[in-house]
Amino acid sequence: MSTHNVWTHKGTFLLAAVGSAVGLGNLWRFPYLTGENGGGAFILVYALTIFAVGIPILIAETMLGRNSRRSPIMGMRFLTRTHNTSRAWESIGWLGAASAFLILSFYSVIAGWAIHYTWQMLTGSLVGADAETISAGFDALLASPALLTLYHTLFIIASGLIVGMGIHKGIESGLRIIMPALFIILLVVLAYGVTNGDFRAAASFLFTFNIADLSLEGWLAAMGQSFFTLSLGMGAIMAYGAYMSSEISLTRTALAIAVVDTAVAMVAGLAIFSLVFGAGLDAGQGPGLMFVTLPLAFAEMPFGALVGGVFFILVLGAAISSSISLIEPVAAFLVERFDLTRPQAVFAMVLASWALGLLTVASFNVYAEGTIFHTLFGRSAFEFIELLTNIFMPLGGLLIALFAGWALTHSEVMKEMRTNETWFAIWRLLVRFVAPAAVAFVFLRAIPQVEGYLIPAIGALVIVGAFAAGRTFLVDDSQG
Ligand code: PFF
């Protein structure tokens, strides 16, 4: 039997999924990736993948959760039984749990930086500081294992407390305060950016489409980002979907999540680049965009310390509403499988992830180079963990698309999607073929030897393979 309950309100799934989706991915990663990859062209590809791959998989993942009404691992186990398919599909749940655990470990460290900057801003320590001071301050933060561990610990404890209090008292109540506050703060920061910065330059940077800027690497980054930003392929959405009332249309909900998430990324991008260009700074600063370039812009502007502090509170709130969705799927599994109490389950998950996070902490200082990770994988532990999640998330998404596309029956899908046959057909085409091919393409590009004509050739193979996989591994009588 499923031990799950249901959200108190019909709209809570939407709230929770938006909470999960809107996070460091929107406020930190999206702007810097856009900055590094030439602006408008990157955004075009990003929007395309959100609609052609992201939304269909979002629908698929929610569907698996709501259909099974269990945590991702137990849910997939249940679905493979009820749909008479290979047990191997249970790997979707395990892959998801592994990704959640890995992502939380570094997400918490980076969110911790925002605690530092909230403090620095609100105490006015950066007012009038110059570029060198601010950049040295960031380096000093990264060089301190003690500070990084402190912030990492604070952030992960706060996230754990919310999930530990349960889906109603903890997650629902928490989100009902955090999310509206986030939207208000975002608009305040945008208004500030428009009045104090260079909005025109920001808009033209984000929305001017120059085909020459469309590098293949940017294409890949856009695709990876669309998975990360929608929290796809790792069970967070499946876990939340398990608590969703059966009456709501998944199609509309998924569309709403994607639209809000994309809108937040755009507004954040507009606000951040207005400030950055207004201060005459460079947009292509990479990961340091939010923690070095932006504080510098705030340092020079009227009321910059106050608005900057509020901005970093926004970052923290967005990060915590995402980190709780990383804890929930694993905690729910531990509760279902091992009969732990919720606080025990959360504690186990958070403690393990916290400990792994220490590797990320050390990657910026004591283990910055010359460790076993560098020797074996040519990168730091942090970069290695991030790389793993960049593989696991699309892979999980691919399997989710295939399972939902091939194993679920027409009537099951129609019941969940509550849509007409045309939309159903489009969705199924996308999850059966387009999404798998797109994900395969991303993987292939990650292998440097695979170039040129091989890509479309292997892409075609994957489409045929997806078809064969669907037929072979999924015994499903009602599919025509
Ligand atoms: N979607 C979050 C963001 O954009 O910051 C990151 C994330 C949260 C990814 C939860 C995956 C996840 F399950």
Image: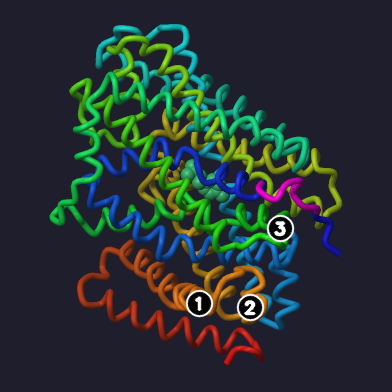
| Amino acid at circle 1 | Arg
Q: Is residue 66 left or right of residue 480?
A: right
Q: Dots 2 and 1: beta carbons under 8 Å?
A: no
Disc 3/disc 1 C-alpha distance (Å): 21 Å
Give x and y (percent) for residue 120. Answer: 44, 13
Q: Residues within 10 Å of mark 1 (few under 14, many from 20)?
A: many
Identity of the residue drawn at 24% across and 30% down: 199
Q: Quadrant of residue 358?
A: top right
Disc 2/disc 3 C-alpha distance (Å): 16 Å
Q: Earlier in the sequence, mark 3 or mark 1?
A: 3
Residue holding disc 1: 428
Which scheme is used to colour this image of the protein? rainbow
Residue holding disc 3: 242
Q: Quadrant of residue 18?
A: top right
Dominant SS of magenta comes to loop
Range shown magenta: 5-11
Give x and y (percent) for residue 80. Answer: 70, 76
| Amino acid at circle 3 | Ala
- The answer to whether residue 100 is above or below residue 27 is below
